[in-house]
Image: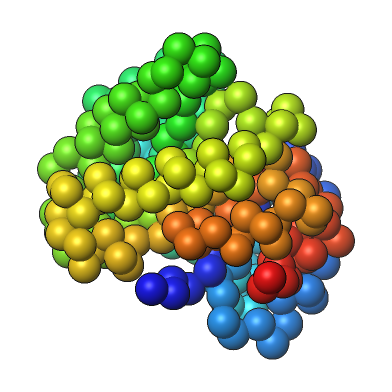
Amino acid sequence: MKRRPLLAGNWKMHATVLDACHLAADIAKTCAGLEDRDVVLAPPFTVLSQVAHMVAETGIFIAAQNVCWEAEGAFTGEISPLMVLDAGGGAAIVGHSERRQIFHEDNALINKRVRGALAFGLIPILCVGETLEERESGQTFKVVEEQVRAGLAGVETADMKETILAYEPVWAIGTGKTASTGQAQEVHAFIRNLVADIYEKDIADQVRILYGGSVKPDNIDVLMAQEDIDGALVGGAALNAESFGRIIHFQEI
Ligand code: PGA
């Protein structure tokens, strides 16, 4: 089954207002006339609303890089789903490995974020992936299964249709090491089967599973040719309009 490709750029903690405006404008140009795929930009919170405003008429979607589960309150340092919506965002990355590794967010917290996003109508992009140590000790599938099951706990079938998953092996993020297409496809197929097991096959066939981890112009085509890879979550290469443009315009092989 063919799913609509989705190419997402995660800007992480990069871009001042001026940088963001230039980058968004250049990316918007490369997306002109594209109708058969979705493009998502996840800028830092400080420029979310400017970037959303700039791409408003282009069909590009805006995602936050994380999101809290409450509408408002005493949650210093957090951003609520309502604030993301208000700034022009429609999605939120949740459970990124940098949140898990550096800020010690665990599966239970990530699940609250996923459900919080959905409760307010934001699409969660739930990231999962094993560390190098976990891969080398043969725990990849166990870790990924735990992260998927716990991350999606309590998510209703209807909401699962909207939810996006991203497989990002931690050892491939920002390291220049991409998982081989075989390694990536194997885990993507595993995740899809897991979704079929938790929900139903129909949902699993529809859910988009992105690959992330050193996606570049020179590996996007072969990654996108894999049956269960429906898109990419791109960090470093998304900070340059030319390289992200090439990724957006991946070629079918
Ligand atoms: P990278 O980051 O493309 O720089 O490896 C991917 C990600 O963290 O989403």
The quarter of the rendered structure image containing the C terminus is bottom right
Residue displayed at 71% across by 32% down: 177
Q: In which quarter of the image is residue 235?
A: top right
Asked where in the image residue 236 lies, by quadrant, the reply is top right
The residue closer to the viewer here, 45 or 239, is: 239
Q: Going 31% across and 25% down the picture, which residue do you hit?
A: 142
Please tell me whether residue 166 is drawn above or below residue 173 in the rendered image. Answer: below
Q: In which quarter of the image is the N terminus?
A: bottom left
Image colouring: rainbow
Give the residue displayed 73% in from the left and 82% down from the top.
Answer: 32
Q: Nearer the viewer, residue 234 or 143?
A: 143
- Compared across the picture, whether 157 is left or right of 176 comes to left
- View extreme (front): residue: 182
The foreground one among 68 and 83 is 68
Whether residue 46 is situated above or below residue 58 in the rendered picture: above
Tell me if I can see residue 214 in this picture. Answer: yes
Residue 82 x, y percent position in the rendering: 35, 53
Q: Where is residue 103 in the image (x, y as percent from the top left)?
A: 48, 17
Residue nearest the viewer, comparing 19 with 157: 157
Q: In this view, does 40 lie above or below 56?
A: above
Q: In the figure, is residue 21 to the left or right of 208?
A: right
Residue 72 shows in the view = no
Q: Where residue 38 sits in the image (x, y, percent)?
A: 55, 71
Residue that appears at 17% across and 38% down: 153
Q: Is 152 displayed left or right of 246 in the figure? A: left
Count of picture labels? 0
Residue 118, percent from left and from top: 26, 53
